[in-house]
Amino acid sequence: MHQMFGKLQKIQRALFTLLGQARNLSKKYGAISNVDAFILALSLPALNGSKALDLGCGARPKNPFLAKLVYGVDIREDLAGNIKRVDLSSEELPFESNSFDFCTAFDCLEHIPRIIHVGGESRLSFLELVNEVYRILRPGGLFLHRTPAFPSKEAFQDPTHVNIITEDTFPFYFCDPHLWARDYGFKGRFELVSQKWESATWIICLLRAVK
């Protein structure tokens, strides 16, 4: 009898473990085919004379919102192409506060360390980058990111991916009503406009700066 009770306890613990894993792997947000479809579904109003910044832009800044003026930041500089060299892990964005209508980050945030050590000091690089995005956005400005996210294997398999995002990272830590990142030094406030999964791999997330 005692052995049977012990086996039942083990089975019960295994079931609770499996249920917990299933909850962690389940997705609360729906699916969308790509970023263009994501934006189209929102029916956002056009902004005349709008200005956009693309983080980690590569050779050419992306402009999904069709802004009139587009800048980029990357590890390389191309001033003729409006691209400025910035180390997003350790440097501030070289732009004035409240100067952009849009900010985008495509397959970029997963490369930003959570924490680095510079001159004996600790820096929460990812959190400080989100602070900078909030700073450069105008009131009501939009921040769009597309990031491979847990539980997809693409979030982990690239050895340069050092920042694993989940579908709860931005809604809970950087958005009303939670703003949990305030405890760690986040100075801004966003509201979640929409969030979807692309190919069960990437989170596409749109936030609005509340100022």
Image (tube, grey):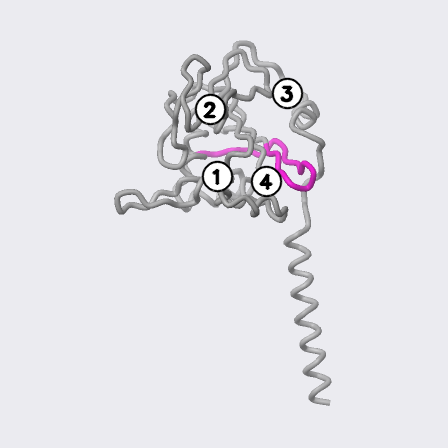
The image shows residue 200 at horizontal and vertical percentages of 68, 41
Give the distance between the C-alpha atoms of the residues marked 1 and 2, in whole angstroms. 22 Å
**Relative to 88, does residue 22 appear above or below in the rendering?**
below
**Relative to 19, does residue 174 appear above or below in the rendering?**
above
Question: Could you tell whether 161 is left or right of 39 in the image?
Answer: left
Disc 4 residue type (three-letter):
Pro
Q: Residue at x 58, y 44 (%)?
A: 155
Q: Which residue is mark 1?
A: 111
Disc 2 residue type (three-letter):
Leu
Q: Which residue is mark 2?
A: 137
Mark 1 vs mark 3: give the one in front.
1
Instruction: Please tell me whether mark 1 sits on a helix, a strand or a loop.
Output: helix
The image shows residue 73 at horizontal and vertical percentages of 44, 25
Q: Residue at x 38, y 21 (%)?
A: 95
**Relative to 163, does residue 138 appear above or below in the rendering?**
above
Q: Which residue is mark 3?
A: 44
Instruction: Tell me the magenta residue range.
Output: 188-205
The image shows residue 174 at horizontal and vertical percentages of 50, 39
C-beta proximity under 8 Å, tags 4 and 3: no
